[in-house]
Image (spheres, rainbow, N blue to C red):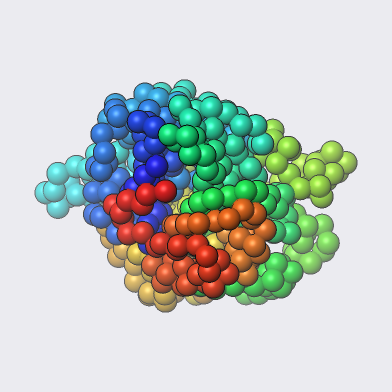
Amino acid sequence: MKVTFYGAARTTTGSQYLIEVNGQRILMECGLYQGRREESLERNRNFAFDPKTIDVAVVSHAHIDHVGNFPNLYRQGFRSNIFCTFATRDLSALMLADSAEIQRADCEFISKQRAKKGLPPVEPLYDAHDAHKVSELFVTISYDRPMLIAPGVKVTFVDAGHILGAAQVILDVDENGRKFRYLFSGDVGRPNQDVLRDPVPVENVDFLQMESTYGDREHHDPVDARGDLCRLISETIKRGGNVVIPAFAVGRTQQLVYELHQLTDEGKLDRVPIFVDSPLAVNATEIFRLHPECFDEQTYEYLHNKGNPFGMENLTYIRDVAYSKKLNELKDPCIIISASGMAEAGRIRHHLINHGKCPKNLILFVGFCAEHTLGAHILSGAKVVNIFGELHEINAQVARIDAFSGHAGKSELIQYVKAITGNIRKITVVHGDEPSALAWGDTLRKIKPNAEVIVPVRGQSVEF
């Protein structure tokens, strides 16, 4: 079996791996790459293989850096099955339709700006039709149910605890009489987090492909993070400012709403207006309520005994663009949660333009921002940033709480690997910026000294 790493190799975005086994070509993940604009456009528009030659696809979860380029794959001729969990299918349909609409709106806006300078218009990677048609190719499998997806290849999805429906992908392979188990970790969630269950240990693994997002650093304690969240918001409200939180529409937004709900109920946070300004986040939250099978025991009991854990009186979900624009006219303090978490797409960029220039306000990041993204630039302390091709000042307070990340920290990744059983012979390290990936590779060599550890570069092939 050969695996070629076409994405998320020494970077955290654009997850994409081509598996060739038993004469079949299996694409695992087809995510959008996010980074420098021109480089992102080039990588996302052009595949390193012919999409029409892919026999089957598998996806671990619905984040856009894992599923976001499937409509473009469809546009270029892909017509095969895409296997995933039930919740991943439901969320992916939303994510892809939203991505298509964001691209349409962004290209329309940017093209108008370019026209003023005599430049040609820009075109989206795909449209709503492509997103709809590729969503019809998703085939669902429950957790822990093996399914034959290609000659000699069975897939089993095991809970990864990352976002709703997220899975570790087990491939049990029979190749020329040789049987082995290949595990792709997907994005490994944090244990003991609110809402979702913990990652499930996998048995009898021969080869491991593993993420490394936080492979070189730890998270803060979730309890401390809850206190930090309350303190930062309270201080901003006290000085009459607004809180703007870039957050991924799927996973992070729901967790934040859950935390704010608890803090408000406990009387630790003033009941200021809270707005979730993202059509995708609104729809995704409704999907969350449809999949209680993914919840941890505490959230499951809250849903059945107390009501909606993702709703309260001072919380408003916004779909309408006109309502979104009205947030700029608010005079009293409020909290605005808007996608995306890396500030690379969606309405969050408009809120950064409108609220980022006021020193009273707070821009609060609650997750990872990949290198070269707008979020990373703001976190680095940049006082002037490029948004929609124009320069804008950032005078607001900027803070970050990474304990709400859906990714396991270094010690939690170590705990995850030690829980895996089997004689692991080879490990490939993916989905981490280069320093993190290399550092995690060194750690793996210490805790798994008998395994060959490889940190592949983009386009590198590895035999198993």
Residue that extends furthest to the front in the rendered view of this protein: 177
Residue that extends furthest to the left in the rendered view of this protein: 118
Return the residue nearer the eye: 88 or 390: 88
Number of numbered discs: 0
Instruction: Give the residue displayed 39% in from the left and 36% down from the top.
Output: 21
Return the residue nearer the eye: 106 or 422: 422
Q: Quadrant of residue 38?
A: bottom left
Instruction: Give the residue displayed 38% in from the left and 46% down from the top.
Output: 3
Position of residue 114 relative to residue 361, above or below, is: above
In this rendering, would 401 be left or right of 263? left
Instruction: Give the residue displayed 14% in from the left and 52% down from the top.
Output: 117
Return the residue nearer the eye: 93 or 314: 93
Location of residue 379 in the rendering, given as x and y in whole percent from the top left corner = 45, 71
Residue 172 appears in view? yes
Location of residue 264 in the rendering, given as x and y in whole percent from the top left corner = 77, 59
In this rendering, would 329 be left or right of 162? left
Location of residue 155 in the rendering, given as x and y in whole percent from the top left corner = 55, 35
Position of residue 128 relative to residue 359, above or below, is: above
Quarter of the image with the N terminus in it: top left
In this rendering, would 9 be left or right of 323? left
Location of residue 234 in the rendering, given as x and y in whole percent from the top left corner = 68, 70
